[in-house]
Image (tube, rainbow, N blue to C red):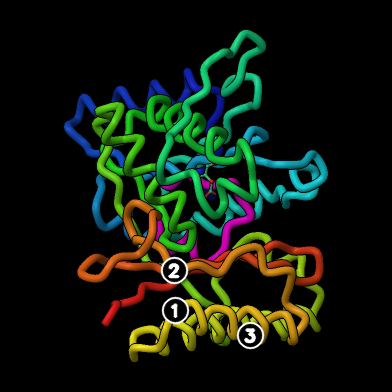
Amino acid sequence: MTAIVRPLADLRGRIRAWKAAGESIGIVPTMGALHDGHLSLVRAAKAGCDRVIVTLFVNPRQFNNAEDFAKYPRTEHADAALLAPLGVDALFVPEGAEVYPPDHATVISVSGVTAPLEGTHRPGHFDGVATVVAILLNMTQADRAYFGEKDWQQLQLVRRLVADLKLPAEIVPCPCVRAEDGLALSSRNQRLAPDARARAAALPQALFAAAGRIEAGETPGAVLEAARAGLEAKGIGPVEYLELRDGETLGPAQRGRPARLLVAAWLDGVRLIDNVAVALP
Ligand code: PAF
């Protein structure tokens, strides 16, 4: 079983010993309810670092409503058991009051990359993410931190945060892991009823089909309008956004630069997000 570590003083003792031995530290920040997507991040961290810490903290500041926060799955012991065969050195599970003591007063806000898409639909979400990621990087003194490309906009935010604050951690992006039918793995998928789960594959199918048509030279506006209508006709909706963006700045997509097609849509009361690379012709 992977050691469940708290409080911070305990983790810091271990980190001191590892650093004194010249060992590098990788972290995989998570909110728990681990699935194969998280495990792929852990495997990448194990391959790149001497010591691996998985952090588990369901961050209240990045939820837009109290009900979503309350419903978020909490499976600490199952998570520790899943990590055991992977040789993780610590599952760090800080208490809420240790991350945000009552006198906590610092909020980190990254502008630009956070403005559109999730930023528009989930006000305050990215301030919560930026603040907790900075706290977790400092708590763990990580040399490398592993983030999934499934949360593409979050990944760009973390890159910006680390560059702007000159944080010493290297951010390592890892490919999105998909179920056999193409649905991007997410802890929230557990909340889909079986019939909704069966229909959910239409989302990545629409995304990949739209990306293919844009790459083949069709007009993005028309392709995306048709894709959106197709999804809503299949009961996937509302579609909050389905947009072609610059892959790095999340501004308007431009020829000659990497582009990304990103989507957020509701199914069965669950908000699904996904994205795919697009090579503009
Ligand atoms: O991607 C997540 O699970 C969370 O946003 C993160 C990075 C662990 C911050 O709470």
In the depicted view, which residue is nearer to us: 26 or 58?
58
Q: Does the magenta stretch include residue 40?
A: yes
Is 219 drawn above or below residue 185 in the view shown? below
- SS category of the residue bearing label 1: helix
| Amino acid on which the number 3 mark rests in the picture | Ala
Q: Give the residue type that dot 2 points to.
A: Leu
Q: Residue 202 carries which label?
A: 3
What residue appears at the point 57 percent right and 23 percent down from the top-left corner?
Answer: 99
Is residue 15 in view from this perspective? yes
Q: Where is residue 65 in the image (x, y as percent from the top left)?
A: 77, 41
- Could you tell me if the residues under marks 1 and 2 are in contact, i.e. CB atoms within 8 Å? yes
The residue stretch that appears in magenta: 28-41
Q: In this view, does 224 lie to the left or right of 165?
A: right
Q: Whole-percent x and y of residue 172? A: 30, 52
Closest to the observer, 50 or 255: 255
Give the amino acid at mark 1: Pro
Q: Residue at x 34, y 51 (%)?
A: 249
Q: Which sits in the foreground, 171 or 32?
A: 171
Residue at x 45%, y 40% (from the top left corner): 90
Report the Cα–Cα distance between label 1 and label 2. 8 Å
Q: Distance between the residues labelled 3 and 1?
A: 19 Å
**CA gap, disc 2 to disc 3?**
19 Å
Mark nearer the N terminus (3 vs 1) = 3
Left or right relative to 231: residue 86: left
Residue 270 appears left or right of 153? right
**Disc 1 designates what residue?**
220
Q: Quadrant of the C terminus?
A: bottom left
Task: Tell me the residue that label 2 is attached to.
Answer: 244
